[in-house]
Amino acid sequence: MMNAMRIVWNQILYFPLIIRMVKYGDQSTYQNFFLGQAWKIINPILQVSVYFVIFGLGLRNMNQGGDPWAYTAWMMLGMAIWRFMNEAVMSGSQSIKKQIGMVSKMKFPLSILPSISIASAIWTFIALGTISTIFIYVGGSEINSHWPWVFYYFFAAVCLSYSFALLNSTIVILIPDYISILRLVMSMGMWLAGVIFRIDSLDNVVGDVLRLSPFYYVVYGIRDAWLKSDSVFQSHFQSGTIIFWSVVLLFLMLGSFLHLKFKKNFMEYM
């Protein structure tokens, strides 16, 4: 527990540096693009538009019918928080391995590198979340009165992404092949978390297991707060909350232990 508290304190202590590193990284990444940092917003919108055409206007209407605007708002919001977590986890998991050479010449803890990746991914959530909100009003609906809960679920998503990325960042250095397994897990996660298809209709053991996933908790929690209330999600809220924060704490404690144990030897494994 002391290791975890030390890691968390570093994130608070070096928060101004994290923000500066995000700004510097974004400027260097997009400096040769004509539209510059606007691509941080344009790129996720273009990619998610493909899912809208296929599932919102295509397969879903052929099989289910219904209002494509309501479904698009529902899908976009889930995709917003999922793509944020996916980008944060995948980039954060490789952040130490990719930047350890630069960091070795500077005086700040390696544990803030996953936080830099997470902060950089926030624009993805903002862009897709804004599009989702537009579709809500286009479809004639309004934002849920419980919308302040969005801040809680976003905070939960940040905690999950960081703890998972911190754990993965050490494993990736120790076992390089692990990154391929992680990509597969995160690719499956989008489907298992119910980002595109509703898990509510799975009234069986499979559905009960999927609803225990920490990714389901965040994705459907955001929707429950921003869109209309989800009775199925709310019925699992108490047990889901206990499981979610237990998983986050487990990832953080294990990730902190491995990070502090091996960080002095990272260069030997590169």
Image (tube, grey):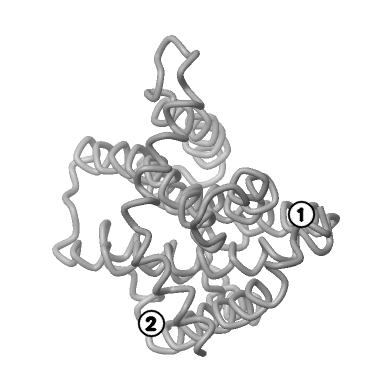
96 sits left or right of 77 in the view: right
* Mark in front: 1 vs 2: 1
Mark 2: which amino acid? Phe
Give the x, y percent position of residue 212.
55, 79
Give the x, y percent position of residue 207.
59, 75
Q: Which residue is drawn at 56% across and 74% down?
A: 213
Q: Residues within 10 Å of mark 2 (few under 14, many from 20)?
A: some
Work out whether residue 235 or residue 219 is closer to the camera in this orientation and state it. Answer: 219
Residue on which disc 1 sits:
179
Give residue 92's quadrant in the image.
bottom right
Disc 1 is placed on an element classified as: helix
81 sits left or right of 207 in the view: left
Please say if 76 is above or below 226. Answer: above
Work out whether residue 55 or residue 62 is closer to the camera in this orientation and state it. Answer: 55
259 sits left or right of 55 in the view: right
Residue on which disc 2 sits:
237
Mark 1: which amino acid? Ile
Q: Mark 1 or mark 2: name the one nearer the start of the chain.
A: 1
Give the x, y percent position of residue 236.
42, 83
Q: In 3D space, how far apart are the residues under numbered discs 1 and 2 (Cα atoms)?
A: 32 Å
> What's the mark number on residue 201?
none
Q: Residue at x 43, y 24 (%)?
A: 39
